[in-house]
Amino acid sequence: MKVGLFIPCFVDQYYPEVGKATYQLLTKLGCDVDYPTGQTCCGQPMANGGHAKDSVKLAYKFVDIFSEYDYVVGPSGSCVSHVRDHYDIIEQTDDVKHVRKDTWEISDFLVNVLKVDGGMLKASFPHKVGVHNSCHAHRHLGVGIQSELNIPNQESTIEKLLALVNGVEAVEMEHPDECCGFGGTFSVTEATVSVQMGKNRIKEHIKENVEFITGVDMSCLMHMEGILKREGHKVEVKHLVEILNSEL
Amino acid sequence: MEPTQAKPQTKFNTKSETKPKANLKTKKIIKQQTQTQTHAQLAEGFLSNQLKASWFNKSIWYQRDKRDVATKKLNEWETLRELASDIKAHTLSKLDEYLIEFEEKATANGINIHWASDDKEHNEIATNLLKKHNAKKVVKSKSMLSEECELNHHLENNGIEIIESDLGERILQFSGEKPSHIVMPAIHKTKEEIGELFEEKLNTKKSNDPVYLTQAARLHLREKFINADASMSGVNFAVAETGSFVLCTNEGNADLGLTANSKLHIASMGIEKIIPKQEHLGVFVRMLARNATGQPITTYTSHFTKPNKGSEIHIIIVDNNRTKLLAEEKFNSSLKCIRCAACMNTCPVFKNSGGHSYNFVIPGPIGAILAPAHDIKKYEDMPFASTLCGSCSNVCPVKINIHEQLYDWRQEITQRKSSFTIKSIMMKGGAFVLSHTWMYRLFGKIGGFFVHNFRKISTMATPWGKGRELPDVPKESFKDWWDNNAKK
């Protein structure tokens, strides 16, 4: 199984550890992983800012780079959902259709494509962890239990995977799928509201005495990390792949 | 507690001034005073009172929680959503036919139908009817359409006293504010604020006891009902096959207005309020209150089919940009909305910015997709007042893809604007850099260098630093690590 590693631009620049963990984890699980170095950005920041037309080139570039792989896997629900949902702005060639269909958010890929179980994963993370369900993965990709819907037996990929990690104590928040307020360009165009929303989120995690906040979107975690640091809290953020890749 | 919302300044008051000379300075002042504040600015004002903002957030969460409990009691909830969505979509596809059918049936029942193409026509029709009946005092139950048309203002200018009979709306009439929510218009006011307002307006004793204050309002409104010459209302649902309409209230105020002294009832409805059959009502009536307030049904669900002997019922059917929206393929499903306000109650941005931070008459996510259909330039900031979290679409009883429409409106707004704005230039520049791998690498290095070595300036230079630290800059990017360690 040839997997193209999709490392979103800000993860590449600011959170290389998350990229490394994604690569190591997928390799450990038997995937043939490659990182095509020509990749830059999927175009989501422009598109969410109302400039989807300006991001057309980036969409073509993305497809061009990743079409040779069986699967494209990235540690970011929002970037993946952008490729899947919003690459309708370019001509729907077979390559485009393939890339849109086969680009996966990492937790979704682990659970629903690789069907990872306890025997395959030897992770250990003896800490109390608060789960942050990021909106794009949670609702747009449907990897979590959506609190608004009355659909029985919804499943959460994050919960399933954390259950395979030794020693981890995963805590669900009072409002388990409330947005953290990052929202891409929203975080700067509506900075005050964005920060307030983030404060409300971290408050719930702090109340539960967690040591780490985890999730599958580094952008949300970066936003919350920024507030945690500014306010002098000791709680840290960790992408789910870092936990799944950690060993004693 | 002080009221927190800074009011948008939309009018330039020249009354007490001599005619200003058209120099640059005055032009600038005029521009400042006529310019409406953006959502971001108004939200900042709202959040400056942290105590009240936190109270407001909790109040709205309370509504969302009640809604979750009520909807989860119905195993068929998601099926109802499908059904409601399909009924509304079907109706919109044959709206002209159903409107005509409604007119025919209602007319046969003895109801008078009027058609208004816009807010101005609506207000004129209402005023003329009231004048014809020599009505000087009018009671009106809650109607967002009348807010949209700014009817009260128009009637007052014509010497007609208009009294809001919904408690929340009456409170706002006292305080001179606009609704901040479409189901609970005065949700932004604390009981302390209402107590003070009633002291001034209703001569109540100093109190913040909701029972006492409600009783005072009740006595006050009873007198208004008895002495009213005419009553007005909105319409929740209009049934094409029967020609009747339905009003859902918790206070019974719509019924009181009708059955008191008044011989004239005027109901205003947008063209999208039609449903084809009586049996469809069951779907919507089961959903509306559950999704809005967590009640199984509103306390009063009143059906109006024909006027009492000696009375008249008039319905004004209003377009006011709705047909324009109907023609917009990407956006016309927003006309399915039944105004339950669940999207507001769940919206994290609404919860943290309040209803008055949206300049349109309908706030929150649904307002943010309806507003640009009315005036894309005036409301250009509204679709951006969202993180696109998608919770709105999940609670919507008629399955409007609200968050997708917010995304699509952003594209429309940007495309219709000049490409020489700072944001546009930055976006285009960003896309240009990112479409060249070497440039992306170079700018990544420069950015990292700045953030690392000039952290303070970098933090202060962008709105990011307002309440957040920038991330640490790692020694090497993932790409660097890959090249050195893993590359095959």
Image (cartoon, grey):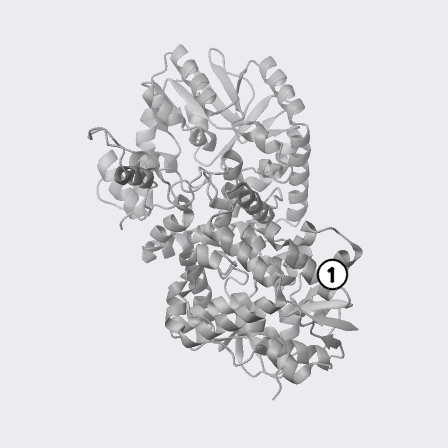
Identify the residue shown where x is 62% and y is 79%.
Answer: A20
Question: In the image, is A7 to the left or to the right of B350?
Answer: right
Q: Is residue B459 above or below residue A151?
A: below
Judge by depth and name the residue closer to the eye, B361 or B247. Answer: B361
Q: Is residue A144 above or below residue B300?
A: below
Question: In the image, is A110 to the left or to the right of B399?
Answer: right
Question: In the image, is A235 to the left or to the right of B156?
Answer: right
Mark 1 neighbour class, 10 Å CA radius: few under 14, some 14 to 19, many 20 or more: many
Q: Quadrant of residue B270?
A: top right
How many marks do you count on the picture? 1
Residue B181 point in image, percent of width and height: 43, 42
The quadrant of the picture occupied by the N terminus of chain A is: bottom right
Q: Residue furthest bottom?
A: A248
* SS type, badge 1: helix
The residue indicated by pointer 1 is A99
Chain of the residue displaying label 1: A
Residue B190 point in image, percent of width and height: 33, 48
Residue B303 point in image, percent of width and height: 55, 26
Residue B54 point in image, percent of width and height: 37, 57
Q: Is residue B389 visible?
A: no
Q: Is residue B6 visible?
A: yes
Identify the residue shown where x is 58% and y is 72%.
Answer: A12
What amino acid is found at the position of numbered circle 1 in the picture? Val
Q: Quadrant of residue B128?
A: top left
Judge by depth and name the residue closer to the eye, A157 or B291. Answer: A157
Judge by depth and name the residue closer to the eye, B384 or B169. Answer: B384
Identify the residue shown where x is 58% and y is 28%.
Answer: B323
Question: In the image, is B160 to the left or to the right of A123?
Answer: left
Q: Quadrant of residue A48?
A: bottom right
